[in-house]
Every structure is written in C-alpha cells, then in structure tokens.
Amino acid sequence: MGVNAGPSWELDGRDWPNRSSSEFFSAGGLRWHVQRMGRGPVLLLLHGTGAATHSWRDLLPILAKHFMVIAPDLPGHGFTDAPPSEWMSLPGMAGLVGSLVETLDVQPDLVLGHSAGAAILIRARLEGRITPRGLISLNGALLPWRGLPGHFFSPAAKLFATNSLVSRVFAWRARDRRVIQRLIDSTGSILDPTGVELYQRLIQHPSHVRASLAMMANWDLNLIEQGLPRLDIPLFLIVGDRDMTVSPREAHRVRAKLCPDAKLFELPGLGHLAHEEKPDAIAEIVHEIGISLGLLAANS
C-alpha cells in the first residue's frame, strides 16, 4: 500500500462498527462513506477532526430507535476521499457536507456535531446548506484559540500539513499503542480497548493524518464567532466538564456573549470524547431535545 493510500474498506473496514449500515455515495467530487440507520426524523451526525464514524459506534444504534440517523466520514477521514487541501477549510467542508445532503435527497430535522463537526454544521446552516430545527454542539470547537496558542497553532499546522514527511512519521509512530493511548488520555476521556484500537487503525494511515492536519491548517473559527449571533435556529451545547481538548469554559463564553438563548447541558466526569464514554447519557439529552423541538412525542 502506497503512502498516499487511505484506509481500505476490505481490510481496515472488515469489522467496522455498524458495518451493515454502511453505504458509499458520490457527492461534491468525492466518494463518501456514510452510515444510515433507523426511521423517524432525520438526525445528521458529524464527527470531529481525526475521527470517523467509529466514534458513534455505540451511540448510533441508540439514537436509531427514534431517528433516521445519517453519519458520514468527513472528507479525508476514515473511508471518505480526501479533497484538495484548500477545500479542508471551514467553508469548504460546509459546502462538501451540503453537497452530500443534496445527493442523499434528505433534509436533516436535527443536527449534532462533535468538536469541529459542530463548527461545520453552524457554517452550513449560516450558508443555507441545511435547514434543521435545531443544532447540537457536543464539546464543540466554536471559538478561536486565545493568547499564545492562537498565534502558534495555525502557522504550525500549516507547516506540518504541507510536509508529507510529518504525516508519514506520525502514522508510523501510531503503530505503537502507547502513542495512541497518550493521545486519547490527553482529551480527558477514558476509552475501552476497542475504541483505542479503532483510532489506532485509522491514524496508522498517513492520508488520515494529513486530512486532520489540513483541517487544522485551514481552520478559521473567527467565521463562527462572527456568525453565531446570526444563527436562526436553537443551539444546544453539550459539554463534558473533563474536556481537555476544548475547555468547557468556551461553551459558557458562547452562551454569555454570542448566543444567550443557547441551552447548556453539562456532563460531570466526561471528557472530549463523551459520546464514546457514555453514549446513553448523550442519547438521553438528544431525545429530550427532540421532544422539545416537537420532533418526537413526549412518550416515545
């Protein structure tokens, strides 16, 4: 397998979580891996940078009891093709997700994004690419880095993203389970061995690493900070209080300064990957939100 090759569905996806729900579609010039499950109001899930549909492995079947759940691998992640690196910007990703929604010929009633996935959904709504009744941000990365990290992070990511050796070296190091374990630990979450192994399986591919770096290099969260006051649908903020990737304080800043009507749900003891740690707790909140928006019956 060449250094530019992505994960193989036949090999890396051989026992992929919820594999029986997987389909492949062409949209926006890319071949997408998408999982669909359940019936009812349409719920679109977008994972965060460096992840894939495996991150919903336990949550998706629970949500599918009440929703038709649609969960794609984002461009360049998992088993979805990578676009040119300049398309990995926030507007570019929102546009590509919009193209996928058009191809699937569905309009989500509710959307949920984890980390960077939440920013993509907000941008897609601001551009009119999706028209949901509500938007759920799960440990969402919605505000620009402040202070020294803000001055360092993007330039460093740009440098790493343009150097193919960086992605190859990182993928090679990912063969060591301890490297992936430290990466997971740094999020404040505790995953079972299966969860760690699935991340390791993906990160061993330079193309997956390169897509993650390209997103970081092209990311401009000023667009979200400027756009949030114009968001015309209810915003729900789910926050793990042990999140070490996106500070829980950021959700409070969003509500205090940009979206005072946003409803906040705090999850004690959970980190950035809260949906993988306690899928039942996330599903319960999503169900509550579905009822509040009139998408689900109170006794469902």
Image (spheres, helix red, strand yellow):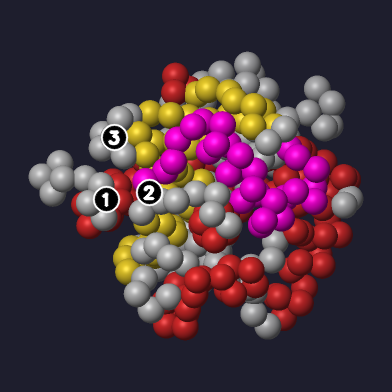
Quarter-of-image position of residue 76: top right
**Identity, as a three-letter code, of the amino acid under mark 1:** Gly
Residue 40's mark? Answer: 3
Where residue 299 sits in the image (x, y, percent)?
10, 45
52 over 271 or under it: above or below: above
The reply to whether discs 1 and 3 touch (Cβ–Cβ < 8 Å) is no
- The Cα atoms of the two marked residues, 1 and 2, are separated by 8 Å
Q: Which element carries disc 1, helix, strand or loop?
A: helix
- The Cα atoms of the two marked residues, 1 and 3, are separated by 11 Å
**Identity, as a three-letter code, of the amino acid under mark 2:** Leu
* Residue range of the region highlighted in magenta in the rendering: 82-110
Horizontal relation, residue 116 to residue 70: left or right: right
* Label 1: few (<14), some (14–19) or many (≥20) C-alpha neighbours in 10 Å: many
The answer to which of marks 3 and 2 sits earlier in the sequence is 3
The residue singled out by tag 1 in the image is 290
The residue singled out by tag 2 in the image is 110
Q: Which element carries disc 2, helix, strand or loop?
A: strand
Q: Which of 170 and 237 is in front in this view?
A: 237
Residue at left 66%, top 40%?
75
Which residue in the rendered view is the most extreme toward the left? 299
Residue at left 43%, top 65%?
232
The reply to whether discs 1 and 2 touch (Cβ–Cβ < 8 Å) is yes
User: Of helix, strand and loop, which mostly describes the magenta segment?
Assistant: helix
Residue at left 80%, top 22%?
1
Where residue 187 sits in the image (x, y, percent)?
53, 59
- The Cα atoms of the two marked residues, 3 and 2, are separated by 11 Å
